[in-house]
Image (tube, rainbow, N blue to C red):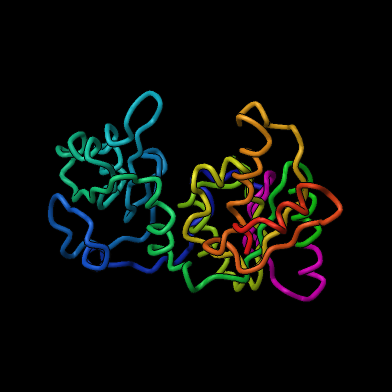
Amino acid sequence: MTEASVGIRPEHPSARSLAALVEDSGVEVCGSVQGVEVTGVSLSSREVLPGDLYVALRGDRAHGAAYAAQARDAGAVAIVTDAEGAELAADAGLPVLVVDEPRLALGDLAAWVYQTDELRPTLFGVTGTNGKTSTSYLLDGLLRQLGLTTGLSTTAERRAGDLVVEAKLTTPEAPELHALLARMRESEVRAAVIEVSSHALGRHRIDGLLFDVVGFTNLSHDHLDEYADMDEYFGVKLQLFHPDHAKRGVASLDTPWGSACSRSPASR
């Protein structure tokens, strides 16, 4: 297993016209986007590759737009940020797309760049307090026994066919996740299993994805210090079962929270 500094990217990304994106979305633009072609998306100026859209978010200590010049020097072709970020990035000399909430736009943006909204493997998602990783590996093993080339994203690793790299987060940020799926497509992966944490759901990391099947393992008091109570924690987990994220859901009716999951309007 190797460690990838920018996650797994497609080897042969397709260039997308930024002008077409602007025309379709109606987003506010500072600067000219004519002739600008995009091949990737990055949240970190340190991980930008040539052809990337650099998405600059407000951080706890600094705004990502303060590093617009570094992103430009690394090869970024445009910046996506909020109004505050647009002012900070004005001197970078790159076109700036201005949105109210860059994080909320991130998933759909990455899906557009990497064309994962339609051209992707069959997707399985697994969430729950405990057992996510084990269940993901069991499901991956079953799919491989069926003769399918599989992809995997867990707490431990990311895998696209025969390529395996070490994971930094349980569920990657949206740009890395969509790039991984694009690489899976190149590797002719037929089915992929994604471990989905509550952090990922709360931070919109899986936005832009529609899972074919998702599963709920259980809910316990682990991580409860991050939520007001079990109901709030459960509500975050339920987001994965919303029709915007999943076509079908599976939950064990032998547990109270599994039964609640099956009855929730969010999972219908």
Q: Residue at x 68, y 36 (%)?
A: 230
Question: Is 158 one of the magenta-colored residues?
Answer: yes
The residue depicted at 18 percent of the width and 40 percent of the height is 92
Residue shown at the point (43%, 68%) measured from the top left? 115
Q: Nearer the viewer, residue 51 or 18?
A: 18
Q: Quadrant of residue 43?
A: top left
In the rendered image, is residue 46 in sight? Answer: yes
Image location (x, y in percent) of residue 210: 55, 65
Residue located at (80% from left, 63% from top): 141
In the shown orientation, is residue 145 left or right of residue 193?
right
Q: Is residue 142 left or right of residue 195?
A: right
Q: Which residues are magenta?
A: 140-164
Q: Quadrant of the C terminus?
A: bottom right
Q: How many numbered discs sit on the rendered protein?
A: 0
Residue 227: image x %, image y %? 61, 31
Residue farthest along the right direction in this orientation: 254
Vertical order, 192 against 202 (above or below): below
Residue 76: x percent and y percent? 29, 49
Identity of the residue furthest to the top in this view:
61
- The reply to whether residue 164 is in sight is no
Whether residue 246 is situated above or below residue 254 in the rendered picture: below
> Which one is nearer the viewer's eye here, 139 or 237?
237
> Is 91 displayed left or right of 163 in the figure?
left
Tell which of 221 and 74 is nearer to you.
221
Residue 211 is inside the magenta segment: no
Counting from the top left corner in percent of width and height, residue 182 is at: 50, 65
